Image (cartoon, rainbow, N blue to C red):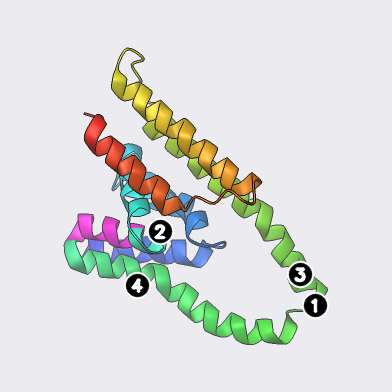
Amino acid sequence: MELIWQLFYAFLKTGVFGFGGGQATIPLIQEEVVENYAWLTEEQFIDYLAMGNTLPGPIATKMSFLIGYDLAGFPGAFAALLGLILPSTIAIIVMFTLFQEYKDTAFVKGMQAAAKPVVVVLIAGVAFSMARGSVFVGMDFNTARTWIILGLFVVAATLVLLNELVPSFDVHPAIIIVSALLIGGFFIR
């Protein structure tokens, strides 16, 4: 039962401080489950993150459910998920009411402008950590596996950049993910 409460509390903290959406909460989840409680290693966390990214829906809720389930079954999954969504549910109700009243003030506009670059940096930090821990670790350049993984990394990065920089270029992220899964399943052993 103690683990259930710890899961609830760990994800409650993530839910309280997870400003900027699902991707921005990933470093907070990592801090709790890898650093604070040591429930997962960094490699295991990256595996869960990769698995969560292949499933539909918001990443933070998927991560909370998967990690909670892995550690304590369905009670752990529900405790982690509830801890994660409870703060935002309460905040949405309260903040929407206040936001409607004060959305045009300079203070609120300044808060929104200040949060954006911080969220971008947090997401970039997670991307760097993922690349370091899952793509570039233990690479043996004498194997086809390494070259396929590097090729997927370069192709995915190129497609994402083209999607952002060329308005007429539009490849849905799901196509990139499913293609990578199929290539991995057939060619990476």
| Tag nearer the camera, 2 or 3 | 2
Mark 2 neighbour density, 10 Å: few (under 14) some (14–19) many (20 or more): many
Q: Are dots 1 and 3 in contact, CB under 8 Å?
A: yes
What label does residue 82 carry, if any? 4
CA gap, disc 2 and disc 3: 27 Å
**Residue indicated by mark 3:** 109
At mark 3, the secondary structure is: helix
What residue is at 49 percent from the left and 44 percent from the top? Answer: 126
Would residue 64 be counted in the magenta stretch? Answer: yes
**Residue indicated by mark 2:** 59
Counting residues from the N terminus, which is met first, the one under dot 4 or under dot 2?
Answer: 2
Establish if 65 lies above or below 42: below
What residue is at 56 percent from the left and 63 percent from the top? Answer: 19
Establish if 47 lies above or below 114: above
Q: Are dots 2 and 3 in contact, CB under 8 Å?
A: no
Q: What residue type is labelled 4?
A: Leu
| Quadrant placement of the N terminus | bottom left
